[in-house]
Image (spheres, grey):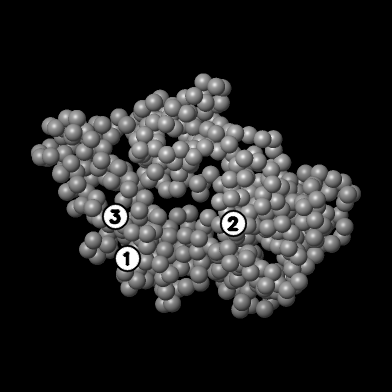
């Protein structure tokens, strides 16, 4: 393919990035600046100019979906032989090659979810710790492993979900169970590859012969384990390009850090730095607001002018929800499809009242993630209450007492910031369900546990029907909405 033809559709900034084919390169790409196009065209330009052998290139993406999109673009550019995959997929493929020769057996299967092992262990923890959500424990193991810690070297950088001595005991049990079942988890794929290349010179030499030209997307969300693997892949060579935006780091809670992106030029002297600032996604009005909110931000819009973002104050959460519903109805009557509207919140717990409000208003919606009534803690709370059928007394008192005994839930003892988002979301969800019981009792003072369970079942069915209708307003956390677009967005 003609090199100039490859560059023809790129703007000057993108062209500068695409033609930087050798040596260490860092591309600082703001939101909507066309970084996927730049990465694919940089690969194509390097191949067309002889700067690299396509068979020796490895393009690392953050998700499998992004990898599939990159492979599709590279095929369209005549480069089906270029590998594009996540860190995990590349590590697993390499381990599968070396493992039989080293261990005399195939690579173990990958555990789909830690919860299959940790769930039963969590329920066997001593005392009140048995109420600790298994996912919180799994997340802490993941965070420790990507920081290259072991049960013997565990040093939490935040408040762990349970005391460290109990946590490390559970972690050892988890690792022993994996060994007995002959499975590995996602972090093992990376750590085993790192250990292999750190200790086996022949394996390291082979991977160096296989790959010599690297590009890493979403570099701002790289963790230590991934960075160590990348360093071992690269060796003493310098053909590495990283692409990212420190303002879009969203996985720090799993151990990722933007430090690797921000210090790249210091760690690789002579690195070329290219900034992409032309945004193809947002209107000038939105970018003007973003540039003012984020110091140093200089995104420039290529889109025509649009409406000015509005900042509205409301007396309380209920008034805010009512105003958003009113705006949704108005937009729909003006011809804006529900599918082009979204309500984006910070935490899962904030989705709950909007699910209820949209259901009551008979507005179709789709939840990116798990619906409120389908959440594990809500299912567990409902199951626990079924055993209380026939119990007399104040509905709210009965519900609160039983959940404290069975789930360790205390409405007045909300987890602090150090406990983590998952624990806070779980508490908020159960507090919301308890508030529903309190509201039902206020309307019907003689309401029983059976009445409350029937009310929950009805709400669950209504919510499921509203979501099943499809083609509706999107409800999502900001994390899950990354990279998506709508005509109208509400940020309560």
Left or right, 250 with respect to 305, comes to left
Q: Look at discs 2 and 1 and give the one toward the viewer.
A: 2
Helix, strand or loop for disc 2: loop
Residue tagged 3: 414
Task: For the residues labelled 1 and 3, say whether their Cβ atoms are less than 8 Å apart.
Answer: no
Tell me what residue is drawn at x 56 percent, y 57 percent: 249
For residue 170, which numbered disc appears in the image?
Answer: none
Helix, strand or loop for disc 1: loop
Mark 3, other Cα within 10 Å: few <14 / some 14–19 / many ≥20: some
Q: Nearer the viewer, residue 195 or 254?
A: 254
Tell me what residue is drawn at x 68 percent, y 61 percent: 242
Residue tagged 2: 295
Q: Nearer the viewer, residue 304 or 489?
A: 304
Q: Nearer the viewer, residue 222 or 435?
A: 435
Q: Position of residue 177 (x, y in %)?
A: 40, 65
Q: Look at discs 3 and 2 and give the one toward the viewer.
A: 2
Q: Which badge, 3 or 2, comes first in the chain's sequence?
A: 2
Tell me what residue is drawn at x 37 percent, y 62 percent: 418
Tell me what residue is drawn at x 42 percent, y 74 percent: 155
Residue tagged 1: 162
Residue 371 can be seen, yes or no: no
Q: Which badge, 1 or 3, comes first in the chain's sequence?
A: 1
Left or right, 51 with respect to 491, comes to right
Q: Position of residue 171 (x, y in %)?
A: 39, 68
């Amino acid at each position: 393919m003609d090199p100039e033809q490859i560059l023809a559709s790129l703007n000057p900034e993108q062209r500068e990035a695409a033609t930087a084919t050798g040596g260490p390169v860092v591309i600082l790409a703001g939101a909507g600046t066309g970084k996927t196009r730049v990465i694919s065209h940089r690969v194509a330009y390097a191949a067309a100019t002889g700067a690299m052998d396509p068979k020796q290139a490895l393009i690392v993406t953050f998700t499998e979906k992004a990898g599939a999109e990159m492979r599709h673009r590279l095929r369209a550019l005549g480069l089906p032989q270029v590998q594009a995959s996540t860190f995990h997929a590349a590590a697993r493929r390499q381990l599968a090659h070396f493992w039989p020769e080293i261990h005399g057996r195939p690579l173990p299967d990958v555990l789909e979810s830690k919860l299959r092992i940790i769930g039963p262990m969590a329920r066997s923890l001593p005392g009140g710790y048995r109420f600790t959500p298994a996912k919180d424990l799994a997340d802490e193991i993941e965070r420790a492993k990507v920081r290259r810690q072991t049960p013997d070297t565990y040093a939490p950088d935040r408040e762990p979900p349970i005391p460290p001595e109990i946590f490390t005991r559970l972690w050892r049990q988890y690792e022993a169970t994996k060994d007995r079942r002959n499975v590995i988890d996602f972090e093992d794929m990376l750590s085993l590859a790192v250990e292999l290349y750190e200790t086996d010179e022949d394996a390291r030499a082979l991977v160096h012969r296989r790959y010599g030209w690297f590009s890493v997307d979403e570099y701002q969300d790289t963790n230590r384990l991934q960075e160590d693997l990348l360093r071992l892949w690269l060796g003493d060579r310098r053909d590495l390009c990283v692409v990212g935006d420190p303002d879009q780091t969203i996985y720090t809670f799993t151990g990722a850090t933007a430090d690797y992106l921000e210090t790249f030029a210091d760690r690789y002297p002579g690195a070329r730095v290219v900034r992409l600032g032309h945004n193809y996604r947002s209107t000038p009005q939105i970018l003007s607001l973003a540039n003012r909110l984020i110091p140093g931000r200089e995104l420039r819009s290529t889109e025509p002018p649009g409406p000015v973002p509005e900042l509205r104050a409301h007396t309380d959460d209920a008034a805010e929800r009512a105003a958003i519903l009113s705006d949704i109805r108005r937009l729909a009557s003006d011809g804006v499809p529900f599918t082009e509207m979204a309500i984006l919140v910070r935490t899962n717990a904030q989705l709950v009242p909007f699910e209820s409000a949209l259901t009551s208003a008979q507005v179709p919606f789709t939840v990116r993630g798990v619906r409120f009534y389908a959440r594990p803690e809500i299912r567990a709370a409902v199951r626990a209450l079924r055993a209380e059928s026939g119990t007399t007394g104040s509905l709210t008192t009965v519900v609160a007492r039983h959940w404290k005994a069975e789930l360790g839930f205390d409405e007045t003892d909300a987890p602090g910031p150090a406990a983590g988002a998952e624990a806070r979301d779980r508490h908020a969800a159960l507090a919301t369900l308890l508030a529903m019981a309190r509201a039902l009792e206020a309307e019907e003072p003689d309401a029983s546990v059976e009445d409350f369970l029937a009310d929950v079942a009805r709400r669950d069915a209504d919510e499921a029907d509203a979501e099943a209708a499809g083609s509706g307003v999107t409800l999502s956390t900001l994390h899950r909405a990354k990279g998506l677009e709508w005509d109208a967005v509400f940020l309560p």
